[in-house]
Amino acid sequence: MAVDRRRVPGEVRAALFFLAPGLLVIGLFFLLPIAASVLLSLTDFDIYALGDVRNVRVVGLRNFSRLLADPLFWTSLRNTFYFVLVGGPLTLSVALAAALLLHSKLVRWKGLFRTIFFAPYITTLVAVAIVFRYLYHPRFGGLNRVLELFGIPAIDWLGNPKWAMPAIILLAVWKNFGYAMILFIAGLQAIPESLYEAARLDGAGRLQLFRRITVPMLAPTFLFLGVLTTIGYFQFFAEPYVMTGGGGPLNATLSTGLLMYKQGFRWWNMGYAAAIAVVLGLVILAFSALQFRIERRRNA
Amino acid sequence: MKRPVASVLLHLVLLVGGVAALAPLAWMVAASLMPTGEANSFPPRFLPSRPTLVHYRELFTRLNIGRTFGSSLLVASATTIVSLLFNSMAGYAFAKLRFPGRDRLFGALLVAMVIPAPIAMLPLFLLLRSLGLVNSYAGVVLPAASTILGVFLIRQFARGIPDDLLDAARLDGAGELKLYRKIVLPLLRPVLTTLAIVTFLATWNDFIWPLIVLTDERRYTLPVALASLVGEHVQDTELMMAGSVLTVLPVLLLFLLLQKQYIEGITLGGLKE
Amino acid sequence: MARRRRELALLLSLVPAVAGCAGGHDGRATVRFWGMGREGEVVRDLVPDFERKNPGVHLVVQQIPWTSAHEKLLTAVVGRSTPDIAQLGNTWIPEFAGIGALDPLDGSVAKSAAVSAERYFPGVWATSRYDGAVYGIPWYVDTRVLYYRRDLLARAGYPAGPRTWSEWRDAMWKVKQIQPPSAHPFLLPTNEWEQLAILGLQKGSPLLAENGTRGAFSGPEFRAAAEFYVGIFHQDLAPIVSYSQLGNAYQEFARGNIAMWMTGPWNLGEFRRRLSPTEQNLWMTAPLPAPDATPWPGVSFSGGSSLAIFRGSQRKPEAWKVIEFLSDPAVQARFYALSGDLPAVRAAWDDPALARDEKARAFRVQVERVVAMPRVPEWEQIAQHTAERLEAAIRGRESLSAALAAIDRDVDRILEKRRWMLARRTGGHGR
């Protein structure tokens, strides 16, 4: 029965054949541009260069030093961190709460509720961003109308620099919590009931059960969702593009991704935009690494 | 005695949550049926006074949304089919075929997977420009035609295929291509189904890349067309809502239809890591 | 297996479709035209007429929204996927000509019987020139005048609209007294830079200094204009909203929640279309007020759109036919009737529909007092940045002086490349 599979003729050739299309696409359209991005960020490639390549200057790290001195960049970075650090945990909290509710033995029609909560995740971001934009209108929008029932005075959601980001975060939480909820439910279902029973025998209360068993057992799910949500949220773009006319009011919703788009594809300062992209990429990488490290230390 | 009270309370909370989750979508549908101007009235209305389809008619006749719909369908289907093919081929090769340097190559790809995509955007655009692919469907489809994540997921799944099965077929004289078609693809079916749904939905909903690459109104996908429509018709709330309904409805229906596979799929993908 | 093969076949069949389609339509030459916003829509209505007169040409019109038009056009240029002919905002011509995207038209003009300089308003004809060559043929004139609620302004004592800045502010105050509390006399969207630039031009600011290589925004002229502009918001005479956050401006105007709006000729058509017949006598137009102690009317900018042919076009002669067709006085008059856009060709103003139109009259007066925006490729970026920056002053986040100084600093940085290019050219390395 022992066929020496290492020597099967043609297997290497077959592998080449099967790998070629995928690797070609990944190499040409992903890896190559990433390397090129770093090179691009060292030039002042711009609209004049698009007309005539001789108008490119190699500027070294000047784009980066300009970036660090650009208040707009810092504003965008602050907004992006605001979105990630508030929106991310909020999304996961709502998701966990929903998952706990749906995991409860007392709840009926679980499938129905699960579908309803998950539905926003499926929707097209641009479309629902437009819907929310109208719902946020201070006079004609439904949200203020609902808040009015509770005696909360009208808020100019997207027009007030203080409220614009919370408004966008609310949309993000609404849209994304369903996905995390599904994974949390799966994580909860994987926790053996016997663990809870043993702890109950030890006299643990509800809160203790949650803290000592549920949370640690969900740790891998938390890590996965944390990294995933962070990476996604760091790149937010469509919400301000569609809802606040490109980052307004007063650049309160200008994300770093949007700044890159504007510099690169609106004004064609592609060298400068590439520098923004590289910095954003590094920030995302660092943040993901940090989450992995925290998780590892907790386990150690 | 406490149980019923707690149960009622739980359901109440869920009900409120459910309403909050659905209300924006419900209002979208309602506003799309309102006569012009009604969605901008004070106090705000939640239901149309007399439902009308006039905005949908305008979208199809004057704004030619049918064509946009076709663009979205074409881009999403083409991306799904091509990426399924390419990813399954590569994933299978990494899982089951022996060739020198396989694990090192795969490891390198995994490392590259953590690099966020936006970094690549600007040079990718310049590359597509030199290939003459700006403002073509190919410019949207090709960069998504294979992804490291897709290759990875298929490889994980394909590792479960027993070697004996493949070797037996080889002994019977089956070529590698036939092996892939007759044995591997059918066995990969569950993961392919999941990937197909995920890819289709993601492509349908994708915004930034089509926005950058497609310059021509006739090739716009729905999200790009919507964002562009909002620039011109921001005043026409009801029209915009009709456009949003047409964009969201197909994916929602698709989801409701394939819900089971989809949710199983993302649960699998999530726990595998 | 048969299914797999079918999928593969489907895949292959996509390739030609994906690779982009061009070419003949029943043997006629296809000319692709990009029009913006409402204009794009209206040109579609003129297509049958054009094709009847030019049986060999098939004209395909695409509409792109104004808000993303500049981006889309540049992307097309960069991606080498330009149409044959497009409507270009006059302020964009230096930019597109500067990157070599446009075909010079002097040769065609010299040969043409239908297009010649003296048929146009001189200030308008000048705006589509760059570096001594003609890159666009003016299509319609755009400038800003004051749209106002006749009844409200009459009650405020200005039935024909204010004529000086003092009267203007006074009119706003008086209208505010008779409006409901949440309403505002003036609509001045914070994201639109044109109004701000016009106020600057009215005060005599050049906007850019030193041959368009430095900002002139902290100069006394622009500062005076900016003070007036920011003051309007500080006194709550205009709502602090961008255009996109507005509900429906026309509806708000009809409800009396807005009484004045500085906007362009395309809105003649929009007001007529969107307001009911009974509301039509509510609105009127007037030329712009002038700063105190300067002649009335105050200057407005010489904007509008020109028709330009792209260098990459394979259909230049046919595209030129489209320009000649659209420049015909009768077609210009018809275009006005359809869109409300004002003819760039003088003769078209004699058309009875236009000559009799009392709401267009303000534009006829205004068009004699127009000034061009700075003619540098970076202008669009500078102008938007300026409006963004002043929003901080409007909202009291920054003092006006600080904002203006910052604008000049940023503008100097944006224009660095241009200074380098100019220096290189005079140094003898350029074209």
Image (cartoon, coloured by chain):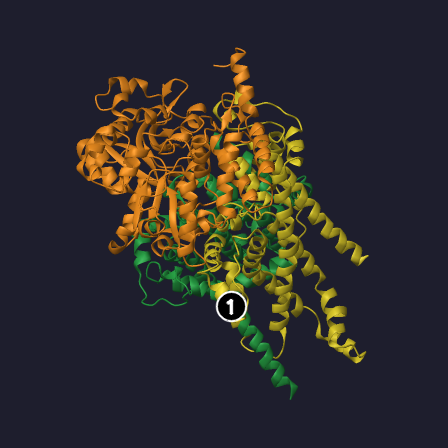
- Please name whichever residue, C392 or C79, is drawn nearer the observer in this view of the structure: C392
In this image, C258 relative to C28: left or right? right
In this image, A217 relative to C134: left or right? right
Who's the residue at 59% across and 22% down the image?
Answer: A57
Q: Which chain is green?
A: B
Identify residue for label 1: A148
SS class, disc 1? helix
Residue furthest to the bottom in view is B1
Who's the residue at 25% across and 56% down the image?
Answer: C278
Look at the image and tell me in which quarter the C terminus of chain A lies: bottom right
Q: Position of residue B143 (x, y in %)?
A: 52, 41
Q: How many marks?
A: 1
Q: Position of residue C151 (x, y in %)?
A: 31, 52
Q: Which chain is yellow?
A: A
Q: Position of residue B196 (x, y in %)?
A: 50, 54
As shown in the figure, which amino acid type bears the numbered disc 1? Glu
Q: Position of residue C413 (x, y in %)?
A: 58, 28
Chain identity of mark 1: A
- Judge whether residue B133 can be spotted in this image: no
In this image, A209 relative to A261: left or right? right
Residue C30 picture quarter: top left
- Please name whichever residue, C262 or B226, is drawn nearer the observer in this view of the structure: C262
Q: Relative to A194, does residue B220 appear above or below in the rendering?
A: above
- Please name whichever residue, C292 or A198, is drawn nearer the observer in this view of the structure: C292
- Counting other residues with Cα less than 10 Å from the Cα at mark 1, is it few (<14), some (14-19), or many (20 or more)? few
- Judge whether residue C427 can be spotted in this image: yes
Q: Relative to A16, does residue B13 appear above or below in the rendering?
A: below
Residue C109 picture quarter: top left
Residue A189 picture quarter: bottom right
Q: Which chain is orange?
A: C
